[in-house]
Amino acid sequence: MDLKTEFSRMPFEVLFDELLAPYTTLQIGGQADFLAFPEHEKDLFPLLKISQNFNLPITVLGGGANTLILDGGVRGLVISLSKNFKGLEVLLENKDEVLVAVGAFEKIPSLVRFGISNGLSGVERLMGIPGTFGGALMMNAGTATQYVEDLIESVLWLPFGERKMKTLSKEEIEFSYRATKLPAPGVVISSILRLKRGSKEKLEDLYEQNLSSRKKKQPWGRPCAGSIFKNPLNDKAGRLIEECGLKKLSIGSAMVSEVHANFLVNTGGAKSSDMLALIDEIQRTVKKQKNIDLNLELNIIGEEESPTRICSHA
């Protein structure tokens, strides 16, 4: 039985040669050989079995923030958890703390609103961050001093190679600045957060201040991925890029934001090659003028070239 037939038998949607640009906040990216939308945890098991039988690489696509998909697309199977891997649930609470289960595809803004409405401190470090909680977990998102890792109690995870759900404690996960490493490649299903009781009024005020500040300091209305570079030690990537005179620099339809220099925007029809060339120019110029290496926070997925697609011959 060929791959198309195998995937066509799934009781959920699997698309062939699907363009991935619409699934990212940058609106850039080539085609996936197979793009699957499992609706339940049990749907993941046949996907992993097929991928193992046909030796297909697997890519998990979150909400598409902080991600550049290359123009050549992504080979193998891309899994999107967008259909039914959401949800917020209070599991346990006392006068000081609350344990909250969060689905991997739960949007960060909805988690923040949930925390504020229930007076739960900890969510403030995620205010203004786009995308899903699963994505925020995998990049250890947060502020300059507070990170997702500080909230994690445990993570429900399905390793690709074992096809058995596992619960990882915080100690079994390797966190670092803007990066998270699990014991092996796999799919994060949900997380349990330990949040503290806080003042609803103070959280609401902080949210309004944060929202107002971000509207002034970050680009709105144009496709972008969020911060492109990690901040160097004791410095800011945006400040360095601006001091090098690179604000509004364009290559093709990729441009350094005039609002915040650590944001690159798609001014319309940008290719991944435009973004990569602009990133390279920024890194080269900052190195030359400041003798500082800027490291990427952006997650780059896929291939620059467009080889023969797997499903075209399946």
Image: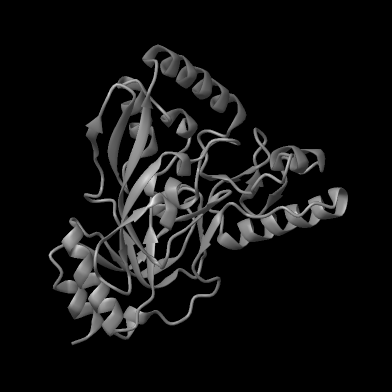
Q: Position of residue 214 (x, y in %)?
A: 55, 27
Q: Position of residue 31 (x, y in %)?
A: 41, 67
Tell me the residue at 42%/39% (across/down): 151
Q: Position of residue 287 (x, y in %)?
A: 81, 54
Q: 207 or 184: which is nearer to us?
A: 184
Image quarter for residue 41?
A: bottom left
Residue 132 visible here? no
Q: Residue furthest top?
A: 201
Vertical side of 289 occupied by 69: above or below: below
Q: 246 or 53: which is nearer to us?
A: 53
Residue 109 visible here? yes
Label tally? 0
> How has the structure been colored for display?
one colour
Tell me the residue at 23%/78% (across/down): 4
Q: Position of residue 117 (x, y in %)?
A: 31, 20
Tell me the residue at 25%/59% (across/down): 37
- Locate the N terminus and report the quarter of the image it occupies: bottom left
- Locate the C terminus and report the quarter of the image it occupies: bottom left
Vertical side of 141 occupied by 205: above or below: above
Classify residue 10 as left or right of residue 163.
left
Classify residue 118 as left or right of residue 225.
left
Tell me the residue at 46%/44% (across/down): 149
Vertical side of 14 occupied by 278: above or below: above
Q: Residue furthest right?
A: 289
Image quarter for residue 116?
A: top left
